Image (cartoon, rainbow, N blue to C red):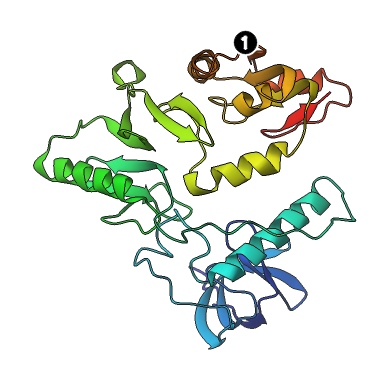
Amino acid sequence: MRSVIAEQILNIFIERILPGGLGLAYANGQTTMVSLAAPGDRLRVRIDRVKGNVAFASIKEIIEASPVRVEPPCPYFGRCGGCDFQQMSYQAQLNAKVEIIKDCLYRIARIEDIPDFQITPAPNEWRYRSRAQWQYDSERKRLGYFETASRRVCDVAECAVLVPELQHQLTELRRRMADGSLPDDARYFRAVVGDEGVAVSTGARSPSVSEGSAEIHRSIYGETYSLNAESFFQTNADLLPQLIDAAIGEASGDLAVELYCGVGLFTLPLARRFKQVIAVEENQSVANLARLNLANASLTNAKIENNECSSMVRNCPGGRRQSRAATPL
């Protein structure tokens, strides 16, 4: 005889937002995390699953909406896993991210006295993403992003966060999907915008037939970088000058060590400030691009080490891992 488990419904108040956009609440002595919630929401929720002392829930009714709750502009939001915070105003998103960072510093690094700070807002709330990866389901003819917490492809015709050049590229790929000219063994398409257009690479089920990506160039803060769709590069190009300033500031000296250097976004400006720079990148092809960028900039005082950063950190005094950080010595 099959047992029937009664649906558990709770009325809760959302205190704050956690990584991944989950709202945090406490009810009946239990921690509850709610999808698509906003801080300050009063909700009626359904418990979907319980893991240990934590319940995961979904919204059945918004009893009283938070003052920062807004209507998500993207019709795919809530199903598509590409964005987490569209249910909140932009300022509320920035505030939530500050609290998320503070929480991580406290829980992971055990830092208690965290000074107040603000996140620099983007010049454009929408149409800012200059790098993307689109998943492809050749059987069902779907192209877009994975649905939230699944490997199903959410078929996306228009993405509100893509810069116009990438939206045009997505539209072109969808046209090819419709006429059957996309490779059947493709799993995803990666694309990045450069000064001269868009570079695209195809990830296939068989690596031996994976298409490569053409080099493209991006001018940032007086430096020119060669990159491709397979190499990591920051997605919001509008904020890169501010990011470089925040990372390096007025630092200068004899030696700087940079981990996870990628194609050299920070390496080039570091090499203009320090007498010697050692930058570490695990991916061989990306490390080669960093070397190319240094050579094109006529910078000879920086060395790119092609190595696993975590192993190098373990061999450093204290063994502390630093993510994409430059440390003057």
Residue sitting at x 84%, y 26% = 319
Residue 79 in which image quadrant = bottom left
Residue 218 in which image quadrant = top left
- Relative image position of residue 93 (x, y in whole percent): 59, 65
17 vs 151: above or below: below
- Relative image position of residue 86 (x, y in whole percent): 48, 66
Label 1: few (<14), some or many (≥20) within 10 Å? few
Q: Is residue 272 left or right of residue 157?
A: right
Q: Nearer the viewer, residue 98 or 293?
A: 293
Residue sitting at x 75%, y 52% = 104
Type of the residue with mark 1: Thr
Q: Which residue is mark 1?
A: 300
74 vs 192: above or below: below
* Residue 54 can be seen in this image: yes
* Residue 204 can be seen in this image: no
Question: Which residue is farthest bottom?
Answer: 63
* Total tally of numbered discs in the picture: 1
Q: Is residue 75 left or right of residue 36?
A: left
Q: Secondary structure at mark 1?
A: loop
Q: Is residue 21 left or right of residue 208?
A: right
Q: Nearer the viewer, residue 5 or 266?
A: 266
- Relative image position of residue 48 (x, y in whole percent): 55, 68
Q: Nearer the viewer, residue 279 or 187?
A: 279
- Relative image position of residue 55 (x, y in whole percent): 65, 66
315 vs 42: above or below: above
Residue sitting at x 47%, y 61% = 125
Residue 191 in which image quadrant = top left
Q: On the rendered image, what quadrant is the C terminus found in?
A: top right
